[in-house]
Each structure stands twice: as structure tokens, then as C-alpha cells.
Amino acid sequence: MLRPDSLPEPIAAWFEANPKDVEAIARCFTNDAILKDERYTHSGIEEIRRWKAATATKYTYTCEPFAVAQQDGMTVVTSRLTGDFPGSPVDLRYFFRLERGKIAFLEIIP
């Protein structure tokens, strides 16, 4: 697992709060952030908050980041999710773009 200090602060905060602290996760994003997950796009902090609240109640899982890289101006974190969802465990890649010390864009890709 990556040490939290090896990630930029808003990304480390995202992984520390994930999966259950919906409000802490929402605070990681800019007001007009875009999040893409499972073929859906969530625009703005309120949609992101609803998305996270729905996933937090639907599944129980742990999220352990184990690799980080830079690609096309984004920080790419690979993490293992293990839980009570179909296909567990799975490694996901998180593509983060930061602006003004917050997450402005996040795409989650299996």
C-alpha cells in the first residue's frame, strides 16, 4: 500500500475517506468537478456527493492504493478494491486532475 504522503493532499484525503465518509470525500472536489465512473458522468459537487452516498450504502469494501504515476497532466493511482460487490477483488485506476488544491476531474477505470 502507498504511504499517504506519497500522494498529493487532496488525493490522499480521497483515499483516507473512502469508502464511507461522504462529506469528507465531497470536500476533496472543486464545486464544478467532473467524476466519471461505470459509464456515468457526475457533474458538480452535489452530484458527486449523491454518487458517493449511493455507492457507500450499496457495497461494503476496502480501497488500498498500491501504485502512482503521472500521465498527460494527471495523477494516476491504481488501487485494489475488495468487498461484497460482483467481481471482487478488482484493481481500478483513478485518473485525477487537480486544480487549486482540489480534485477537478476524476475518472475511475477498471
Image (cartoon, rainbow, N blue to C red):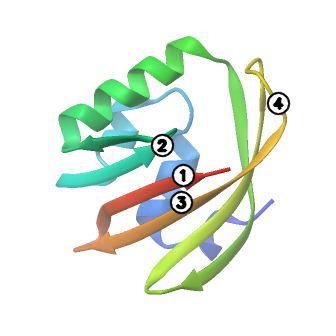
Give whichever of discs 4 and 1 has the lower sequence position.
4
Amino acid type, mark 2:
Asp
Q: Residues within 10 Å of mark 1 (few under 14, many from 20)?
A: some
Marks 2 and 4, Cα distance to the nearest angstrom? 17 Å
Q: Nearer the viewer, mark 2 or mark 3?
A: 2
Which residue is outermost to the left?
Answer: 31
Q: Nearer the viewer, mark 1 or mark 3?
A: 1
Q: Residues within 10 Å of mark 2 (few under 14, many from 20)?
A: some
Q: Are marks 4 and 1 in contact (CB under 8 Å)?
A: no
Marks 2 and 3, Cα distance to the nearest angstrom? 19 Å
Marks 1 and 3, Cα distance to the nearest angstrom? 16 Å
Task: Tell me the tag on residue 80.
Answer: none
Rendered residue at 28%/53% (across/down): 34
* Residue under label 4: 88
Q: Nearer the viewer, mark 3 or mark 4?
A: 4
Q: In the rendered image of this protein, does residue 99 appear above or below residue 79?
A: below
Task: Tell me the tag on residue 37.
Answer: 2
The secondary structure type at the circle numbered 2 is strand
Q: Are marks 1 and 2 in contact (CB under 8 Å)?
A: yes
Q: In the rendered image of this protein, does residue 74 appear above or below residue 93?
A: below
Where is residue 71 drawn, in percent x and y?
55, 84
Give whichever of discs 2 and 3 has the lower sequence position.
3
Task: Tell me the tag on residue 108.
Answer: 1
* Residue under label 3: 12
Quadrant in the picture for residue 25: top left
Q: Residues within 10 Å of mark 3 (few under 14, many from 20)?
A: some
Where is residue 54 drawn, in percent x and y?
43, 18
Give whichever of discs 3 and 4 has the lower sequence position.
3
Marks 3 and 4, Cα distance to the nearest angstrom? 23 Å
